[in-house]
Image (spheres, rainbow, N blue to C red):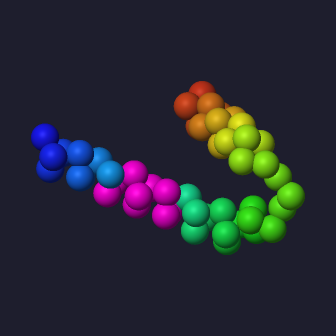
Amino acid sequence: METAKARLAKLDNEAAERIGRIAIKSGLVNLEITDDQIREEFDNIAERIRKGD
C-alpha cells in the first residue's frame, strides 16, 4: 500500500512539474491572474479536449 501511495505521489509531482514548465514557457506566470482563474481556464481546456474540440 505504501509503495502505491509513493508511486501516486511521484506521478502527481511529475504532472505538476510538467504543467509548471508549460505555464512558465507560455508566460502565464507573468499575468496578473488568480489561482482560481487559472484553475477555471484549465477546466475549460480539459473540457474542450474531452469533447474533441
Depicted 40 relative to depicted 14: above or below: above
Is 44 displayed left or right of 17 in the figure? Answer: right
> Residue placed farthest to the bottom in the image?
25
Q: Is residue 25 within the magenta segment? A: no
Depicted 28 relative to depicted 49: above or below: below
Disc count in the image? 0
Task: Name the quarter where the C terminus is drawn.
Answer: top right
The residue positioned 67% from the left and 71% from the top of the image is 25
Give the magenta range.
10-18
Q: Is residue 52 visible?
A: no
- Quadrant of the rendered image containing residue 13: bottom left
Depicted 37 relative to depicted 17: above or below: above
Task: Name the quarter where the N terminus is drawn.
Answer: top left
Residue 33, x across and y down, in percent: 82, 52
- Quadrant of the rendered image containing residue 52: top right
The residue positioned 67% from the left and 42% from the top of the image is 39
Q: Is residue 7 visible?
A: yes
> Residue placed farthest to the top in the image?
51
Q: Is residue 15 within the magenta segment? A: yes
Residue 42, x across and y down, in percent: 66, 43
Is 16 displayed left or right of 46 in the figure? Answer: left
Q: Which one is nearer the viewer's eye here, 23 or 8?
A: 8
Is 11 displayed left or right of 38 in the figure? Answer: left
The residue positioned 86% from the left and 58% from the top of the image is 32
Depicted 35 relative to depicted 18: above or below: above
The residue positioned 23% from the left and 45% from the top of the image is 5
> Residue placed farthest to the front in the image?
2
The rendered magenta stretch, by its main secondary structure, is classed as helix
